[in-house]
Image: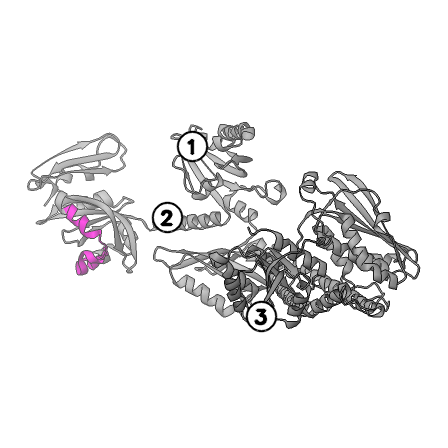
Amino acid sequence: MEFAQFEWFRWLVLTGSQLRFKGGFGRTPLWFEVDLEFSMDSTELPASLRMPELLHMTADQFFRLMSDHSLETSLLTAPDGRVLAANPAACETFGGTERELCTLSAAGGRSSLADTDDPRLAPLLAQRLAVGHARGELRLRRMDGELFDAEVSSFLFLERGFETTTILKVRDLSALRLAERRAQESESRMEFALDAAQIGDWNMDLRTNVAQRSLRHDQCFGYAAPVEAWGYETFLAHVHPEHRLRVAACYSKAMAGEGKYDVDFPVIWPDGSTHWLRSKGRFYFDAAGAPYRVAGIQVDITKHHTADAALRQSEERLELVLKGSRDAPWDLDLQTNTPYFSPGWLDMLGHPADQPPSEAAFWSQAWHPEDAERIKATVEAALAGSQETYEIDYRLRHSDGHYVPVRSRAYVVRDSNGKAIRVAGVNTDLTEQHKLQEAQQQQAVAEAANASKTHFISRMSHELRTPLNAILGFTQLMLDDEQLPLQAAQRQRAARVNDAGRHLNFLIGDLLDISRIETGQLSVALAPVDLRLVLQEVLEILAPQSQAARVQMQPVEQALPLPLPLVSADATRLRQVLFNLLTNAIKYNRPGGKVWCEAALEATPDGERLVLQVCDSGLGMNDQQMAHLYEPYNRLGRESHPADGIGIGLSVTRALLQLMGATLEASSVLGTGSSFRISLPVADAAAATAEARVSGFDELTDDEPRGVVLSIEDNPVNQLLVEAQLARWPQVRLLQATLGEEGLAMIRGHRPDLVLLDMNLPDISGLEVLAQLGAEMALGSVKVVMLSADAMADDMEASLAMGAVDYLTKPVELSHFLSRVVLHLRTPDA
């Protein structure tokens, strides 16, 4: 049908170069408009476009008139989708001639141009049939079969024969989709880099004062979850008041014309803490020069804000990430197999940054041979799967030949079909971490060895103390026995045995203490202590040794003639310190030599202290010996000296004093003698008045104790010793058991006033006995004194925590043992 055969129409020539027709079909109530643009030199139409000719044009002719010189892709199609005509732009878009397009569509219909699997096709066809026109996006097919996204619009056109034609306009979106994908990939990569570097990004519409931020941005201001509303005033309110004006001025200056700002400032978090941030942003201006948007980043630089040189300012966000991170970034384009290795990555492997490799194989060639298969499998699995990130530890070869342990964290970029097209990430040098782990492993091995050694020493100490308890106990009984007194020669021999046993006991104690010091298990219990009584006791113990060595010791009355305040110390440990110092003063003296003590009060900034000096006129030491004075097991070249010892006394002495808050200083002159200065803190006056605890043995009174004592001990000799020690008190009844369960039965049956309990029993331990006593309400008040050769602090603390009232370590001094028994028999039950 020709254009003139419309039932009615009207036309209008507009000024310029536009011709507009508007009309409607008789059978189809549809309006249409056609704008025709052409060039003319006058206000009259060219002859070829005069109205009579326009009125008799066919649909094909009029389509060509409209579209041949148009840059838009236009097709004239039949109702069944066949291409009737195509303009040059369409031929270029679909990659074929007009004849090829018409021939292809005639053979295959609309399926040759449109992807029939596209779900958007059917709705568009239905819309065109219903209202005469349609617009939307659709996937089309080029002549070579390639599918591409396009924006299409169609509307009914002139009738051709007995069918109504349709004009289909196509806009190829391939370039737009490619740009969108690249932008999305770039954004994903940037988001990964920003998150890895802990950088928060944001942008704000200045017209609405509404900001969009990443979660990392809000975390920089102390919020674990995103804040609902955020604007410039909200931001400024978080800035530290002392820096608020400076930050606002920087912001205003950038908005007034400079466009960019870079400023460091502290912010106050909701919990009140202060953190430093670096804010970097840029303003965007419209054509009139008015700012309409600002965007930037926030970086938490709390740990590094004082090290400005380490955090160089950067113009670009990615550059800031790379410079602010200790990690070494890398990137690999899988489509071109082009790598990027950052200067930090190259430096990590000792390669010059100004000569970066251009081959991806450089990376795989640096893999450790033992790691290669594992790396390859991990990377291939990540690229073939759907995961976005992967992490793997492996080794890379340094330029000098050694291997660097690294941790590689990577992000996989995929196209719209899910195919991996790029992978980027960072490598972290794990050298220091591996050194730390190795040091920790070595420390664990050393601690295990120390624990094993401590256990061995503890067991050895136990095995030595058990027979030593009998030796010292029975010799003390013989020496104190008034009913069967020893002859003078026998008494002298027994005293020598007792002295040797006590010396051996001190050596065992020092050996155990040095092990505790090495493992950090040595502890002290501080209390007010009378130094005079402790010194008197030690001098009495060492009197036989000084007489045998023909060394004169100054009496305590001359050493400490004036009343002295109590000191803050552990009485037992202070006795051990004085014993070690005085023993050395006797051992390393000469016949006819002297040992003396001097005491004085000294005021210090930390309070008043009591200074005690132990002096001798013995062999003395040179400077080289003084330099190694406190080394364990070092006898300073005097291994051949007749005096016995293993060289740990002074090591233990100094450690004990340090635990008690005291100090030890030494001075010596070779051939003249030595002096050791102890500075002890004076005890608090109120505490000293309330409890003047002393370490001397409690004196026994004539008021003999009475009661029932149960001894649970598996060693027969020690049972005889306890029996002999308590035999002096006829009103004390002694019961004996050799097993823990047997002892528990006797406690239930006899309810003794005091239980002497060994730690190591054949059936159950002393701690298990205490646990069962604590579990039975009726036996919870039974007083238990631990009497054991185990001297480990853990055992003592556990026993006291489980209800024991005292812990006596074998071998125990006879008078001390008796005084503690008297104390607990006379003390009412709790």
Which mark is in front, 1 or 2? Answer: 1
Where is residue 777? Give x, y as percent.
47, 56
Quarter of the image for residue 708 reads bottom right
Q: Nearer the viewer, residue 562 or 134?
A: 562
Where is residue 626? Give x, y as percent.
84, 57
Q: Main secondary structure of the magenta part?
A: helix
Residue at the image position 19 percent from the left and 44 percent from the top: 134
Q: Is residue 809 left or right of residue 507?
A: left
Which mark is in front, 3 or 2? Answer: 3
Q: Secondary structure at mark 2?
A: helix
Q: 10 Å neighbourhood of mark 2: few (<14), some, or many (≥20)?
A: few
Where is residue 523? Give x, y as percent.
66, 54
> Label for residue 180?
2
Magenta range is 103-128
Q: Secondary structure at mark 3?
A: loop
Q: Label 1, on which residue?
A: 231
> Label for residue 559?
none
* The N terminus lies in quadrant: top left
Q: CA distance from mark 1 to mark 3?
A: 82 Å
Q: Secondary structure at mark 1?
A: loop
Quarter of the image for residue 674 reads bottom right
Q: Are marks 1 and 2 in contact (CB under 8 Å)?
A: no
> Label for residue 738?
3
Q: CA distance from mark 1 to mark 2?
A: 29 Å
